[in-house]
Image: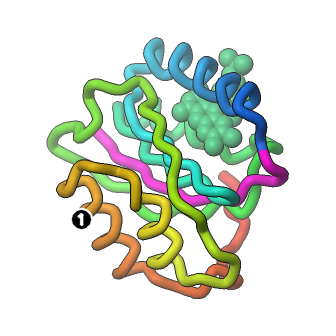
Amino acid sequence: MHRFLYISTVRRTLSDAELEDILVASRRNNRLADVTGLLVVGNRRFLQVLEGPEDAVNSTFSRISKDQRHYAVVQLNNKAIAARSFARWEMGFQRGGDVNEGSTLEEQVASLLEPVADANLKAYFSGFAKSHSQPAGETTNMRH
Ligand SMILES: Cc1cc2nc3c(=O)[nH]c(=O)nc-3n(C[C@H](O)[C@H](O)[C@H](O)COP(=O)(O)O)c2cc1C
């Protein structure tokens, strides 16, 4: 079982209908691939966690990373896990707070997670972002 976490930037502001398209396709594909997770969207950033069998997570991410609706896809964490944290969600969805340009990764993740109620989940993500904090301008475009 693997967990994969990344952050990316929206190419242009997406309408509710466009976000809905992403979620419908994600839930359909993830159910078939045994992938679960959470997608958080701020005004210009996505934060997504994908969990499942390693091959399934990698092939899902490789498709997502080529998606033209976002760019500057930065992998934050990819590791083996004993159990899923998002087992109930084929792809949960949460709208995040405002993300300011030029803020650090830690600040961006904190903003995105502001509306998330689950304290453990918040601690997990913000602790992770803290240990990987970097100025937003230094993010790179990763291709797999
Ligand atoms: C931010 C973001 C997150 C996405 N998450 C997923 C996902 O979890 N699973 C998935 O299959 N596709 C996801 N997609 C969509 C894929 O990039 C791709 O469009 C889709 O998998 C194609 O599915 P289809 O061939 O069934 O239409 C995401 C796209 C974006 C922009």
Q: Quadrant of the N terminus?
A: top left
Name which residue lies at 26% across and 29% down.
Answer: 87
Q: Is mark 1 within 8 Å of ligand 1?
A: no
On whether residue 3 falls in the magenta region, the answer is: yes
Residue 133 place in picture, x, y as percent: 46, 83
Residue 143 place in picture, x, y as percent: 70, 56
Residue 100 place in picture, x, y as percent: 64, 75
The image quadrant that residue 2 belongs to is: top left
Name which residue lies at 17% across and 39% down.
Answer: 83
Confirm whether residue 48 shows in the render: yes
Q: Amino acid at mark 1?
A: Ala
The image quadrant that residue 82 belongs to is: top left
On whether residue 44 falls in the magenta region, the answer is: no
Q: Looking at the magenta stretch, what is its main secondary structure?
A: strand
Name which residue lies at 57% across and 25% down.
Answer: 26
The residue that mark 1 highlights is: 123
Name which residue lies at 40% across and 53% down.
Answer: 115
